[in-house]
Image (spheres, rainbow, N blue to C red):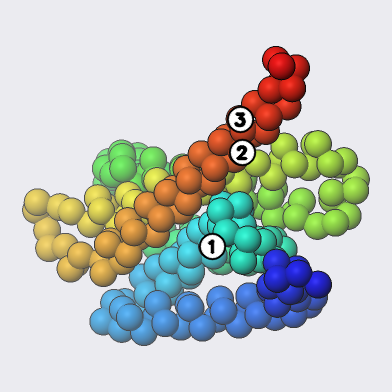
Amino acid sequence: MNKNTATKKRWVAGWKVRHLMVIAFGIAGTYAFLESRAQWSEMHRWNRAIGDMSLLMIAMSMAIGPLSRLFSVFRGTTPWRRELGIYGVILAVVHTAIILVGWVNWDLMRLFGYEFHPAGLYVMVNQGFGMANVIGIIALVYGLVLALSSSDWSQRKLGGPVWKFLQQGAYVLWMLMVVHTAYFLYFHFQDYHRSVPDPNWLQVPFAVLVSSVVALQISAFIKTWRLRRNRTRSEEQPLAG
């Protein structure tokens, strides 16, 4: 057994163990986010804590692929992408439910930035809120499709090429989640005619997290491109001679 194989086996665990560990991580992380905003209202505490944990899990899932390409020590972590992605999406569903129940009170027009006017009609008062929620809903749909297809059974039924093409939608999900989260972190709670809460402490960590994932993806792309270019050159060299 070589060193890389031994390292990989240290990361690999059965699917039941991975599910339990990711669930425990999700609970612990959500609790930590909750306690970090003890002064907020209950609805916003739970809304943000679960949303933040969802984003963190999806970010970790997105980072595993590039890390495994860049560093051999992470190659055994690849199976963890599935569980992190699944529970990240489940938390996103809970996050959406809290918004529907606690923020807009099941009034779907409010979800899209409208408020009921005394004249008897809905008027648009918050375009940014509505657009961010549209993006969030699209991300949720993407996430549900990916989560439901994240199984060996789905892979067998769909076939390798189709399943792989479908799973590439994770990049779309990631970018939609980033835009959705960025709006609420940096733009939504700014108003010139009413008091606004203190800046969310997650603004800087969020920027670092997103930048890190993007940097890993770019680095992995460059490494893969260089390896393929060198392989092509080595194959063509004997022919030139």
Q: Position of residue 132 (x, y in %)?
A: 39, 45
Amino acid beneath label 2: Leu
The furthest residue to the top:
240
Q: Along the line of sight, which residue is nearer the eye, 89 or 159?
A: 159
Q: Is residue 228 at least partly visible in the picture?
A: yes
Label of residue 60 in the image: 1
Q: How many numbered tags mark residues here? A: 3
Q: Is residue 111 at least partly visible in the picture?
A: no
Q: What element carries label 2?
A: helix
Q: How far apart are marks 1 and 2 (CA)?
A: 25 Å
Residue carrying label 2: 227
Amino acid beneath label 3: Arg
Contact flag, marks 1 and 2 (Cβ < 8 Å) = no
Contact flag, marks 2 and 3 (Cβ < 8 Å) = yes
Q: In this view, does 221 lie above or below 75?
A: above
Q: Along the line of sight, which residue is nearer the eye, 120 or 217?
A: 217
Q: In this view, does 143 lie to the left or right of 56?
A: right
Q: How crowded is mark 1: few (under 14 residues within 10 Å), some or many (20 or more)?
A: some
Q: Where is residue 36 in the image (x, y as percent from the top left)?
A: 33, 80
The furthest residue to the left:
193
Label of residue 229 in the image: 3
Residue drawn at the location 75% of the way across and 17% of the way down = 239
Q: Is mark 1 on a helix, strand or loop?
A: helix
Residue drawn at the location 31% of the way across and 78% of the way down = 37
Amino acid beneath label 1: Met
- Mark closest to the chain's N terminus, 1 or 3: 1
Q: In this view, does 158 lie to the left or right of 29?
A: right
Q: Is residue 122 left or right of residue 78?
A: left
Q: Along the line of sight, which residue is nearer the eye, 188 or 30?
A: 30
**Residue mark closest to the camera, 1 vs 3:** 3
